[in-house]
Amino acid sequence: MLFGRFFRLNTATLAIAVINGQRKFITVHPGSVLKVISRCADRPNAMVDVLVDGDLVEMFAVDVRRRSDEVNGVSLQVQVAADQRR
């Protein structure tokens, strides 16, 4: 299960963000720290909600699993930064 876990992206990956009320494809860059904030199904094409630098995006769960490594010890720092942007 990915929910609540933090990951550091290894490869540039597409995500979907809402920009000016429209869904747009964006690139999430390598080195970005992700926090999965939605539960996902075990289907390969499942989408999950992810915080990237405090911004909400949708990504394929398989991309999070295959293109990133789990990160420990950053949860408090990233969570505080994300909470301050709200």
Image: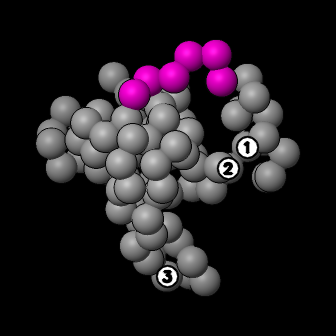
Type of residue at label 1?
A: Ala
Position in image of residue 35 (x %, y %): 54, 36
In what element is the residue under mark 3? Answer: strand
Q: Which residues are magenta?
A: 69-75
Residue lying at the far right in this picture: please name it. Answer: 84
Residue placed under numbered mark 3 in the picture: 22
Task: Give the residue displayed 56% in from the left and 39% down from the top.
Answer: 33
Check disc 1: other Cα within 10 Å, few if <14, some if 14-19, many if 20+: some
Q: Looking at the image, is mark 3 or mark 1 nearer the viewer?
A: 1
Task: Give the residue displayed 24% in from the left and 41% down from the top.
Answer: 62
Cα distance between the residues tagged 3 and 2 = 19 Å
In what element is the residue under mark 2? Answer: loop
In what element is the residue under mark 1? Answer: helix
Q: Is residue 20 left or right of residue 68?
A: right
Q: Mark on residue 54? A: 2
Position in image of residue 72 (x %, y %): 56, 16
Q: Is residue 4 above or below residue 11?
A: above
Type of residue at label 2?
A: Gly
Quarter of image, res 55: bottom right
Residue 26: in sight, yes or no?
Answer: yes
Residue 61: in sight, yes or no?
Answer: no
Type of residue at label 3?
A: Gln
Q: Earlier in the sequence, mark 1 or mark 2?
A: 2
Check disc 2: other Cα within 10 Å, few if <14, some if 14-19, many if 20+: some
Position in image of residue 30 (x %, y %): 46, 49
Circles 1, 2 touching at the beta carbon (< 8 Å) = yes
Task: Give the residue displayed 64% in from the left and 16% down from the top.
Answer: 73
